[in-house]
Amino acid sequence: MTKLSDANFDPKAIFPDEVVTHAHVRDVELPYGAGTMALITLDNGLDHNRPNSFGSQGLAELDAALDAILQRDDVAAIGLTGKPFILAAGADITGMPRITTREQALAIARYGHYVFGKLDAGQNGGKPSFGFINGLALGGGLEVVLHCSYRTVITSAPAVAFPECFLGILPAWGGTWLLPNLIGPDRAVKVIIENALNNNRMLRGPEVAELGIADASFDGADFLERSIDWAAQVITGRIEVTRPPIDRGDAWDAAVARGRAFVENKLHGAAPAPLRALDIIAAAKTCSKAEGFAMEDEALADLMMSEEFRSGLYAFDLVQRRAKKPVGAPDTALARPVTKVGIVGAGLMASQLALLFARRLLVPVVMTDLDDERVEKGLSYVRNEVDKLAARGRINADMANRLKALVTGSTDKSIYSDCSLVLEAVFEEMKVKQQVFEELEGIVSPECVLATNTSSLSVNGMASKLRHPERVVGLHFFNPVAVLPLVEVIRGERTDESSLATAFAVAKQLKKNAILVKDAPAFVVNRVLTRFMGEVTKCVDEGTPAEVADRALLSLGLPMSPFVLLQLVGPAVALHVAETLHEAFPDRFYVSPNLQRLVAAGKPGLWSWDDKGQPYIDEDTRALLEVGSQASTEEEVRDRALMAIADEVRRILDDGVVAEPQDVDLALILGAGWPFHLGGITPYLDRTGIAERATGRRFLPRGVASVPASSG
């Protein structure tokens, strides 16, 4: 089956808003007497901010263009490239929620194979094809060139990847079978599985060539001309393209086994897509292309009807749309220019923030602390991190020197006098923060925005002793600052529009995603995580073995278990937030006596690790713990924790801390690494019935982030 109409598939109904990617064809006379190349340029007519994608009409245009080319005897080769900076971003994901039956999903999978297959010289009558990766190439945008006989890549390509497993499906237009047969299973597992599940890591141009996905790489504005010249030399035999043989012995099986172990460690069986992809990679060792493509068709049809994929689409939409237009953010025209930034404190968090502001804003950043030793330690951290960026080739020597010069420090707070924004990152104690702001108000200009990086304390409380509380705003970053993309922007009762707009503008300049949060204890992410952690630690205090409690949530596919998270955050920080929330809501937030004992003893957490990387509780730590005799099973711990989360999310929404459930989901995805296949948290709580058990109602309307009722 190749026609979409054969599967009750109305393209205009499935993709009603499709921005069609056109397939423009022009003839190029090749040098060296190589003949004529029919060069296809994919272009949706928009700039690089709206990448090309393949909807049903776009596929049909490419299909027709290839048919016309293949009917011509005067064409020696086919070329394929994209509009400036973009090859293609894969399938048009906006139409996927409208695919309501398995038959439709199967049809779109088969049609993609059918169209792209016309680039295969073995199927098109012997015409060699060349894919010129001139920029971003994701999903189907990478698959289309894998069908080509040869490929080149521009060295400046910023993002080449298969993100499908991250979304809950797999590369199903040829990629899962073709890639291991091109570069070997070990590298294919890295690209299809590991990169996708490691926060959707992208390849850059040089990596694409190094892995063997591209046969040649070129830089510069003349990339296409050089690629065409290279293609002509290949056609005429001046250049011979050789690829290393693929080891189809035990190494293939070992690569697949490594991939399965990685998926189990990462997701613990929570999502089916990467395992289906590994099944096809395993089969690709011996099966034919047709057999491999048929496996892709069936897998995509199954996965597109799964709850995990629908949740992944929901999460993807949050990150791609809602995160870029924060709900409630004021007009950006109200934002004040930021020409110098102050960071109060020079500890680890403050130093990370100083580097981030310097690198993204390229303005002077000044830090202060209590003594010269602390200041120098903070500056040394910045200099060392800059050196690491340079060593990895992320910045050049000139930029490294510039960044080091931009960040300075002192023990004298008068250096903040000409700052546009000052962010405090000192100890989480209200009186300390109030004192800092009172000092700053006597130093900075009236236009300077005063921001706090507090994780749990009241912004209103910090501003309460100031003459001008309207310029105080919360900017809560998450650790590690360079990795987690979320900033909770907290509006105090008296925060004015200009200060709030400045906070949002700065977050955008920092390349962070901001959500507007009402001033409430611990805001969103820490409030949810603390309620969740409180329930888990309470189970341990009651008598549940720590190993059992820590495993209880692994089946959700969370990025780390509760007590590993505790180790990362630090017991002292976790205890402080728990105590703050217990003070605000004593009936809901539990303060663990055992956590208090760990902090008092200076323990870094509950776990130690053996030589094999397995966690255990050492004798000294175990001696500190006092536990009861009421043990819970893993299922009971999981149910209690999820019921507590559902209750707290409902209270957050009822209190107006954020506008909608989508903001809670976005916050947990970006600030806590909540898995895409859960859709954040509220879709999962809805579809498992936990939301209604805990709160009496769903968070989202039926049909949002769930499989359509007509699927089959």
Image: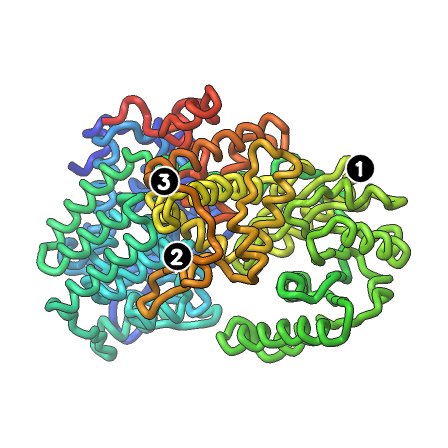
On the image, the x and y values in percent for residue 225 come to: 40, 69
- Mark 2 = which residue? 198
Q: Residues within 10 Å of mark 2 (few under 14, many from 20)?
A: few
Q: Residue drawn 80% across and 70% down?
A: 411
Measure the C-alpha gap from mark 1 to mark 3: 48 Å
Disc ID at residue 631:
3
Q: Residues within 10 Å of mark 1 (few under 14, many from 20)?
A: some
Q: Secondary structure at mark 1?
A: loop
Looking at the rendered structure, the number of numbered marks drawn on it comes to: 3
Tag 1 and tag 3, C-beta contact below 8 Å:
no
Measure the C-alpha gap from mark 3 to mark 2: 35 Å
- In the image, which is nearer the foreground, mark 1 or mark 3? 3
Q: Earlier in the sequence, mark 3 or mark 2?
A: 2
Q: Earlier in the sequence, mark 2 or mark 1?
A: 2
Location of residue 652 by image quarter: top right
Q: Residues within 10 Å of mark 3 (few under 14, many from 20)?
A: some
In the image, residue 625 sits, relative to residue 32, either above or below, namely above
Q: Amino acid at mark 3?
A: Ala
Tag 3 and tag 2, C-beta contact below 8 Å:
no
Instruction: Answer with left or right where residue 91 lies relative to residue 363.
Output: left
Q: Amino acid at mark 2?
A: Asn
- Mark 1 = which residue? 494
Viewer can see residue 37:
no
Q: Secondary structure at mark 3?
A: loop
The residue lying toward the viewer, choosing from 268 and 371, is 371
Q: Secondary structure at mark 2?
A: loop
Q: Amino acid at mark 1?
A: Arg
Q: Residue drawn 28% across and 71% down?
A: 232
Q: Residue drawn 16% across and 73% down?
A: 245
Instruction: Answer with left or right where residue 237 lies relative to residue 484.
Output: left
